[in-house]
Image: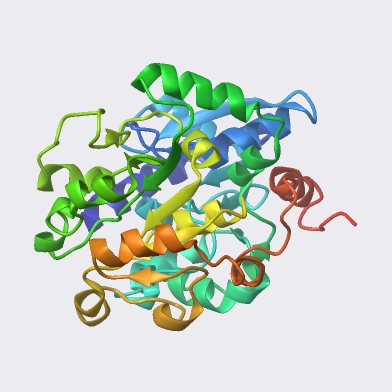
Amino acid sequence: MYFKHKAFGKLFNVFTKNPIDNNLVSFIIDSNESFRGNLEYIKREFEDRGDFEFNYYYKDKLSIASLKKLATSRYVFLNDNFFPLAFMKFNDTSTVIQLWHAPGAFKKFGGSVENASMLKLISDNTDYLITTSKCIEDYYSEAFQIDRSKIKALGLPRADYYFKNHDIRELRDNFNKKYGLDSDKKIILYAPTFRENEVYNNVFNYLDINEFNENLSDDYVLVLRLHPKIKKFYSSQIGVDGDYIDCSDYQNEQELLLISDILITDYSSIMIEFGLLNKPIIFFAYDLDNYLSSERGFYLDYKKDLPGPIVYSTDELVHAIKEGIDTSKLNSFIKTQVDEVNGDSSKRIVDFVLNKGEKNG
């Protein structure tokens, strides 16, 4: 794999001798477009600024034409890891910006948990890393093995979505029609994350859906949003009437967050995005002891710092919902993860790169 990345870098470097096109913006993305959100918001912001040309380079497809454009782009954005970048020497005029797809700092990742030699090479060829808060810059410096001078706390572009003028009633009505759902019921969105220890990935071994519905189905419906890697670990219990709605393949995750009333999660950074909406969060950590001892760990104190109750069983989960969820820590928690909560992240980032690193204002 190392040889493959190095060979790609050498091929790419052949084309960096060509002149830079100052109006060309490239986005590095994979074919399933799983992390496209940030890039789309940046693209729209550039479109509002002038006559720019855009190039999508699909990292799992070798296109010489697209590679040439990538090598001659004035601005290059990526949203997740791209290991060949360790060997790609961009023209000094190009600016390479890592947006990263996750907000805040929750689970440890990258150089915080694994060998960081390749990450250091990648960061040497990255001009800027965008984060959501100055409070988390040390964590990101460690995770990416990048100098803090390259880290800019400008926000998460796709979070701008939550500050647009959405007709939430219409979104909810459309959802009701799609799934035959009673409009009077509140939506509880359950979004568990993937575990490396496979035994804990079948969430229905730990969430008793019958007990949940016996206690809560008069007022609530459970909507399930599984991590893509979890699907093979559980058998779908088909049924919208009284069981749950499986929205794992629902196209717009952010729309689900908007129409949901409560979020249940565990170790997923989705809770930071949901927290921007100032709505209650429950942490269903049925395997916490194993996760703390065997998985990658956290940048915060899981038992003390979270902005919602931690529960370990269906009984505790039901009780927390019935009693009402304390959101008093939510605002202060979000302030440690996101500096500016105003829907202008894309604008700040594009302002920054167009002004050659000098932030407006």
Q: In this rendered view, identify the residue nearer to me: 44 or 310.
A: 310
Q: In this rendered view, identify the residue nearer to me: 221 or 77.
A: 221
Quarter of the rendering occupied by the N terminus: bottom left
**As drawn, is 297 to the left or to the right of 134?**
left
Residue name at image x 57 percent, y 65 percent:
327
Q: Residue furthest right?
A: 361
Please provide percent x and percent y for residue 45.
72, 34
For the question of whether residue 17 can be seen, the reply is no
Residue name at image x 66 percent, y 66 percent:
331
Q: How is the image coloured?
A: rainbow
Please provide percent x and percent y for residue 280.
52, 57
Q: In this rendered view, identify the residue nearer to me: 142 or 14.
A: 142
Please provide percent x and percent y for residue 89.
50, 53
Q: Is residue 258 above or below residue 113?
A: above
**As drawn, is 227 to the left or to the right of 125?**
left
Q: In this rendered view, identify the residue nearer to me: 169 or 182.
A: 182
Residue name at image x 43 percent, y 66 percent:
121
Q: Is residue 232 above or below residue 3?
A: above
Residue name at image x 70 percent, y 64 percent:
339
Q: Quadrant of residue 126?
A: bottom right
For the question of whether residue 122 can be seen, the reply is yes
Quarter of the rendering occupied by the C terminus: bottom right
Please provide percent x and percent y for residue 5.
30, 51
Q: Quadrant of residue 253?
A: top left
